[in-house]
Image: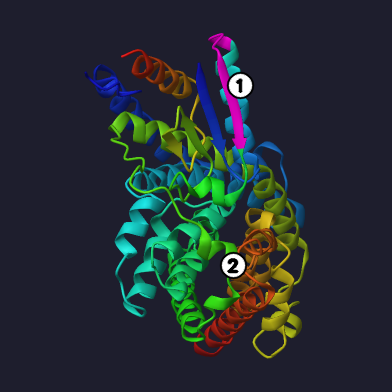
């Protein structure tokens, strides 16, 4: 009997690729005309003076909103294509048999490319631990996956440039490796809820999908629609507030409270970031504007990582499988690692 | 008669999958029982590590994402075919 392969239509392949090429061209053209267009609308069509506060804020807004939305759609598409080659099941197989140390590094790296949503955190945790992956290695993955988040990377790239985006990814990796390693060394297995150790997964039967390029492109397009659909409003509101700060708040206004000299600003930023998960997309444009006015990079990055890495919803979900002591260690170790990274950047940059 | 199970602790994505399944079952006017599996020990019996999972006649057809209605109907069609042969 031939097996049904759903959704494989080889004859449409060519058309799909041509559509993709045209989409890419349209994207490039759009990306290159938004700056002159934003300036033209603000200064010529609407006639605001080039050095007026409102004109400057408006031009900033009209340029940044389409730029970030274009970057988000284009890059989420590319990242999602890459992610169709990975799955949590495959990651688990790759991590099986890795020692602590090497395992932590691998787990953190795989956390970047494996598709992950925080609602899957519990089955993933159980599945990893039960297949014999050390607790610390599992945590390296669970920290890296949400912290090194695609929306955060793309927006940092769009608003701060590739160096800051790269630093962000690098420090996210370091924090995941370090925190996972520490949790592993602390031997906290007994603080995992007891039912986890009793679960016995059904053997064998796992889903092994053969994806065609059509499937990959379709899935990537679906995630563009889903992610952009979810964050666009935050982006617009965030950039509007950012544009206001850009035009109206005096330069160096924030040096005193968010600059390098204020030692307490890093821990304060981390604390403030914990409850702010869902607004990650809206927060980056605001912190970008704050930085222009004297907030320091370490403080800003610490804030960002706390927003995406230490999210309240994920912690609540993980409470189902972790006892309070382990939850406290989990939050504590990550918070300390983020604070340390924040200070480090404030000192070296 | 089909048994369709939606595996997941009740997050937004799991609810979406359930809605899509209900719609497909209704449109194809199938004789199907739709079961929501929300307890982790029960979910883990299917050896999945990303939710939501979709199981038709005890066979896993999708994990970790929301399949489109078109996909769900091909899953259902192949399950029906397998049941007959």
- Kindly tell me whether residue A25 is visible in this rendering: no
Q: Which residues are magenta?
A: B27-36
Q: A341 or B72, which lies in front?
A: B72
Q: Residue at x 69, y 61 (%)?
A: A316
- Left or right for A307, reference B53: right
Q: Dividing the picture into quarters, in which one does residue A17 lie?
A: top left
Q: Residue at x 67, y 82 (%)?
A: A266
Residue A23 % position (x, y): 39, 31
Q: Which mark is residue B22?
A: 1
- Left or right for A303, reference A150: right
- Kindly tell me whether residue A295 is visible in this rendering: yes
Residue A178 % position (x, y): 46, 81
Q: Residue at x 60, y 76 (%)?
A: A191
* Residue position marked by numbered label 2 in the rendering: A194
Residue A238 % position (x, y): 70, 53
Q: Secondary structure at mark 1?
A: helix
Subunit bearing disc 1: B
In magenta stretch: residue B30: yes
Quarter of the image with the N terminus of chain A is top left
- Count residues near mark 2 (Cα–Cα under 10 Å), then give few for <14, some for 14-19, many for 20+: few
In magenta stretch: residue A10: no
Q: Secondary structure at mark 2?
A: helix
Subunit bearing disc 2: A
* Residue reaching furthest to the left: A1
Q: Residue at x 42, y 60 (%)?
A: A112
How was this image coloured?
A: rainbow
């Amino acid at each position: 009997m031939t097996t049904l392969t759903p959704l494989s239509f080889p004859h449409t392949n060519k058309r799909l690729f041509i559509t993709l090429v045209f989409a890419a061209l349209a994207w490039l053209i759009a990306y290159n005309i938004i700056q002159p267009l934003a300036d033209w609308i603000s200064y010529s069509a609407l006639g605001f003076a080039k050095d007026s506060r409102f004109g400057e804020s408006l031009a900033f807004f009209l340029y940044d909103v389409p730029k970030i939305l274009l970057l988000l759609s284009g890059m989420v598409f590319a990242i999602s294509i890459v992610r169709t080659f990975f799955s949590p099941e495959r990651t688990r197989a790759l991590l099986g048999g890795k020692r602590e140390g090497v395992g932590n590094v691998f787990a953190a790296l795989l956390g970047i490319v494996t598709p992950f949503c925080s609602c899957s955190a519990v089955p993933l945790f159980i599945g990893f631990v039960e297949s014999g992956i050390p607790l610390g290695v599992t945590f390296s993955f669970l920290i890296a996956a949400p912290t090194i988040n695609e929306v955060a990377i793309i927006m940092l790239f769009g608003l701060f440039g590739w160096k800051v985006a790269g630093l962000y990814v690098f420090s996210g990796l370091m924090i995941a490796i370090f925190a996972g390693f520490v949790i592993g060394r602390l031997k906290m297995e007994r603080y995992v809820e007891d039912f986890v150790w009793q679960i016995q997964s059904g053997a064998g039967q796992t889903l092994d999908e053969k994806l065609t390029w059509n499937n990959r492109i379709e899935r990537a397009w679906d995630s563009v629609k889903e992610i952009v659909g979810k964050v666009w409003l935050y982006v617009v509101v965030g950039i509007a507030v950012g544009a206001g700060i850009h035009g109206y708040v005096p330069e160096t206004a924030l040096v005193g409270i968010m600059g390098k000299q204020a030692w307490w600003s890093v821990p304060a930023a981390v604390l403030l970031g914990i409850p702010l998960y869902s607004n990650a997309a809206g927060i980056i444009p605001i912190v970008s504007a704050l930085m222009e006015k004297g907030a320091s990079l370490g403080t800003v990055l610490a804030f960002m990582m706390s927003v995406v890495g230490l999210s309240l919803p994920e912690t609540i979900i993980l409470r189902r499988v972790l006892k309070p002591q382990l939850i406290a260690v989990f939050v504590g170790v990550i918070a300390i690692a983020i604070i340390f990274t924040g200070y480090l950047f404030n000192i070296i940059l | 008669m089909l048994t369709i199970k939606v595996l997941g602790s009740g997050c937004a994505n799991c609810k979406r999958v359930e809605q899509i399944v209900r719609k497909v079952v209704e449109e194809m006017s199938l004789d199907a029982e739709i079961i929501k599996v929300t307890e982790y020990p029960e979910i883990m019996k299917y050896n999945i590590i990303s939710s939501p999972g979709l199981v038709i006649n005890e066979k896993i057809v999708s994990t970790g994402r929301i399949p489109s209605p078109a996909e769900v109907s091909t899953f259902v069609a192949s399950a029906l075919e397998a049941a007959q042969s």
